[in-house]
């Protein structure tokens, strides 16, 4: 029997919290309500800074987690109000938290993944069970802990007998290749994170709306090749990445050899980097397919979508809205669905995606 779950997602784009109220069962999720609350500038800045080591970072991280969760609670309240429901109508909240470190398999053979969150506080503020810490069990089982959305993509976008590719372009881009026999998924590389940071630095705008600024520039081929030479892009899956690698410091280092490239041309080149890296992975790993479903904020970047279509002429490239789920709702819906899986002690990960020793029940439950 379907139950109501809330999914909360604040991704690497650091633009705010997307929340959905969804009716979920093992095989599907139907979104009832969607709410987006932007981050206050101070919180977005602090979350960005906590991606790198700094003074008093444990203290700052704990307080940032509290502030994040209070934002989560506001989103939950808005969803319940919009649906005219009380807390008792919702079985659980899936709250992913804010990833600030992601280093699976490194250092000691296990590594770690760290999401800022305070699910106990969220349970107190909402009076609803909270499911959190989705990634660490998969990492403990030898997996990448990411991406976690391919199992959800298969449930909602998979087509029997067909190969379908789903590209989520948030701060980082990740690709799901959906087949009957084996689902593949991994992080392609940068999504919006570098484009957004460069746009903020040079225009004062948090992102390049519809890619208009990038479209007015010119791709610098030499710079593009230098960016595409990043070893991560050539690694075979399973693999995952984040701001630990693709951050403004990485870009600054690459740009040192290209001091004469104009800011607008850097933006055009960063957009091309995302498009090329994603298109190359589609061609490399989704052979036999012809439909690419794009979700996340990148699906709203008209120029980026045009570049993807140009690089994939044999593919039908379109927004997930055309498949029934608007692009800014997909990840939040995934964590509502994953919370449902956890509550019913069903695995939420796929061994073929993360490389773990096997599928695992993900997350920990904080009772209301």
Image: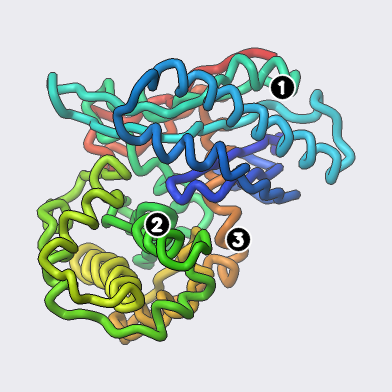
Which quarter shows the C terminus? top right
Q: CA distance from mark 1 to mark 2?
A: 36 Å
Q: How far across and down, in percent of the image, does residue 256 sit?
A: 14, 61
Which numbered dot is residue 358?
none
Q: Nearer the viewer, residue 187 or 211?
A: 211
How far across and how far down the image is residue 317, in percent? 42, 77
Specify which label sits upstream in the sequence, 1 or 2.
1
Spatial separation of the CA atoms under disc 2 and disc 3: 27 Å
Q: Nearer the viewer, residue 11 or 308?
A: 11
Question: x, y percentage for residue 190?
Answer: 31, 57
The answer to whether mark 3 and mark 1 are in CB contact below 8 A is no
- Mark nearer the N terminus (2 vs 3): 2
Residue 128 badge: 1
Instruction: Using a 10 Å C-alpha cutoff, classify the residue at mark 3 as few (fewer than 14 neighbours), some (14 to 19) or many (20 or more).
Output: some
Label number found at residue 325? 3
Q: Quadrant of residue 350?
A: top left
What residue do we see at 60% from left, 38% from top? Answer: 8
The tag earlier along the polypeptide, 3 or 1, is: 1
Q: Residues within 10 Å of mark 2 (few under 14, many from 20)?
A: many
Q: Which residue bears the numbered disc 2?
A: 197
Instruction: Give residue 217's quadrant in the image.
Output: bottom left
Taking the image as shown, residue 76 lies to the left or right of residue 228, namely right
């Amino acid at each position: 029997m379907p139950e109501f779950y809330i999914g909360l997602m604040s991704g690497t784009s650091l633009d705010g919290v997307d929340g959905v109220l969804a009716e979920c069962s093992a095989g599907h999720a139907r979104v009832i309500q969607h709410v987006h609350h932007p981050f206050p500038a101070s919180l977005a800045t602090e979350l960005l800074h906590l991606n790198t080591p700094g003074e008093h970072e444990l203290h700052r991280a704990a307080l940032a987690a509290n502030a994040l969760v209070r934002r989560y609670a506001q989103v939950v309240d808005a969803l319940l109000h919009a649906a005219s429901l009380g807390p008792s109508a919702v079985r659980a909240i899936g709250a992913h938290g804010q990833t600030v470190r992601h280093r699976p398999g490194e250092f000691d053979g296990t590594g770690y993944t760290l999401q800022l969150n305070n699910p106990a506080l969220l349970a107190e503020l909402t009076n609803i069970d909270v499911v959190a810490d989705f990634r660490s069990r998969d990492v403990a089982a030898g997996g990448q802990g990411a991406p976690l959305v391919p199992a959800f993509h298969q449930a909602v976008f998979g087509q029997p007998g067909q190969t379908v590719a789903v590209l989520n372009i948030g701060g980082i881009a990740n690709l799901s290749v959906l087949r009957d026999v084996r689902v593949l998924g991994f992080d392609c590389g940068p999504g919006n994170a570098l484009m957004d940071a460069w746009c903020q630095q040079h225009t004062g705008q948090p992102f390049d709306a519809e890619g208009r600024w990038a479209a007015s520039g010119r791709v610098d081929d030499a710079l593009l090749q230098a960016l595409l030479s990043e070893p991560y892009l050539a690694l075979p899956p399973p693999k995952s990445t984040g701001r630990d690698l693709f951050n403004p410091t990485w870009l600054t280092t690459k740009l040192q050899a290209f001091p004469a490239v104009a800011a607008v041309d850097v933006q055009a080149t960063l957009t091309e980097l995302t498009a090329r890296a994603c298109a190359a992975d589609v061609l490399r790993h989704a052979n036999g397919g012809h439909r690419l479903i794009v979700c996340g904020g990148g699906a709203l970047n008209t120029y980026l979508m045009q570049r993807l279509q140009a690089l994939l002429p044999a593919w039908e490239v379109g927004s997930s809205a055309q498949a029934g789920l608007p692009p800014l709702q997909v990840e939040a819906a995934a964590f509502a669905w994953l919370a449902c899986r956890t509550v019913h002690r069903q695995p939420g990960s796929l061994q073929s995606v993360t490389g773990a020793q096997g599928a695992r029940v993900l997350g920990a439950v904080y009772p209301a």
